[in-house]
């Protein structure tokens, strides 16, 4: 019931390992995708690169750059999804000897700044989808983060984002809407010390083309030295809980060394198979 399904695919192994419960967290460069308002939490120039090992010959890649300035934080992100080579068939169901390569491309420009005590942000997106014919669309995301709450002396952050408000995609003569959705999220620092940090997160997502789904995530970070940290992450998302297998569970880990961060996420899809994501982030 909607086009450009690539817009639903999250970015970054860290957020993915946390079950996609990242609307209230959004404190790294992948906020360009999850909630642009979260970019206000980034103090250094940052680059994030992700490669996902998907089903069959399908590949999914992401790269973004974040640049803080005195007038706000700017971001640029690119999603690229390739379905691999598909054999062309004629109307009688016979192969023609040719093949084609469907692909999706999303380019995002982000801007965020503080307004009073609330962080606000916006994305402007260009979406291109090609099977053999090509369709294009434009969309915006609008998000906010409020981080001035405390519960039992621990910080509680609330995030809200409306994604994919935009034009329809038209292949030849058929138009379909974008997968607009609304996300509400919270992130709570259960433990926050010089050596350890434990974050829990919760998201509610209301898409126009599916039922409401929920996500839970946890990240435990342990400082090994002045320049090295390790993280363990787990999550659960109801949108993949009906695929069988491990029923919506996600997991991963990360290693941060000085300005560099490498993360891995494992996401099973039951009978469809398992997917793996690897991210590399750097701050400078």
Image: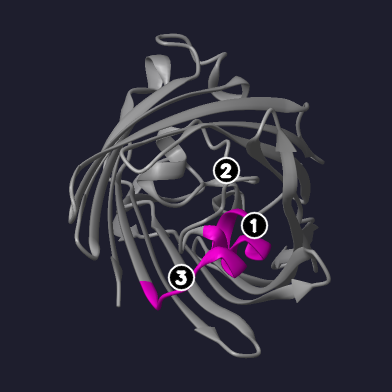
How many numbered marks does the figure carry? 3
Q: Nearer the viewer, residue 116 or 274?
A: 116
Q: CA distance from mark 3 to mark 1?
A: 15 Å
Task: Find disc 1 in the rendering and name its residue.
Answer: 35
Task: Find disc 2 in the rendering and name its residue.
Answer: 22
Residue 213: percent from the left, percent from the top?
70, 26
Residue at the (69%, 28%) spot, across then down: 152
Residue 125: percent from the left, percent from the top?
64, 73
Quadrant where the C terminus sits is bottom left
Splitting the image into 4 quarters, where does residue 93 fall?
top left
Splitting the image into 4 quarters, where does residue 189 fall?
top right
Is residue 31 among what the camera can see?
A: yes
Which tag, 2 or 3, sits closer to the chain's start? 2
- Pointer 2 local density, CA inside 10 Å: few below 14, some 14–19, many at least 20: many
Task: Find disc 3 in the rendering and name its residue.
Answer: 78
User: Is the Cβ of the residue at disc 3 closer than 8 Å to that at disc 1?
Assistant: no
Residue 48 in the figure: left or right of residue 151:
left
User: Is the Cβ of the residue at disc 1 closer than 8 Å to that at disc 2?
Assistant: yes
Residue 167: percent from the left, percent from the top?
80, 69
Residue 135: percent from the left, percent from the top?
63, 69
Residue 80 in the figure: left or right of residue 84:
right
Disc 2, SS: loop
Is residue 267 among what the camera can see?
A: no
| Numbered disc in front, either 3 or 1 | 1
């Amino acid at each position: 019931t909607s086009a450009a399904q690539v817009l639903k695919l999250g970015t970054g192994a860290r957020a993915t390992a946390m079950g996609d419960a990242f609307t209230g967290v959004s404190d790294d460069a992948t906020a360009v995708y999850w909630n642009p308002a979260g970019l206000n939490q980034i103090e250094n120039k940052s680059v994030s690169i992700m490669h996902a090992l998907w089903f069959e010959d399908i590949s999914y890649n992401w790269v973004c750059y974040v640049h803080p300035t005195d007038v706000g934080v700017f971001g640029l992100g690119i999603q690229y999804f390739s379905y691999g080579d598909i054999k062309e068939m004629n109307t009688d169901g016979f192969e023609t000897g040719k093949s084609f390569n469907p692909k999706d491309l999303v380019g995002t420009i982000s801007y965020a700044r503080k307004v009073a005590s609330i962080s606000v942000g916006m994305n402007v997106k260009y979406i291109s989808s090609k099977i053999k014919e090509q369709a294009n669309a434009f969309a915006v995301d609008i998000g906010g983060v409020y981080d001035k709450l405390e519960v039992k002396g621990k910080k509680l952050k609330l995030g809200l984002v409306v994604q994919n408000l935009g034009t329809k995609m038209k292949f030849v003569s058929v138009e379909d809407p974008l997968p607009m959705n609304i996300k509400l999220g919270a992130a709570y620092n259960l433990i926050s010390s010089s050596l350890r940090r434990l974050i829990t997160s919760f998201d509610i997502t209301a898409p126009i083309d599916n039922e409401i789904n929920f996500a839970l995530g946890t990240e435990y970070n342990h400082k090994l030295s002045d320049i090295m940290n390790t993280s363990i992450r787990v999550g659960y998302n109801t949108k993949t809980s009906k695929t069988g297998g491990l029923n919506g569970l996600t997991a991963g880990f990360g290693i941060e060394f000085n300005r560099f961060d490498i993360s891995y996420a494992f996401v099973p899809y039951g009978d469809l198979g398992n997917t793996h994501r690897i991210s590399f982030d750097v701050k400078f």
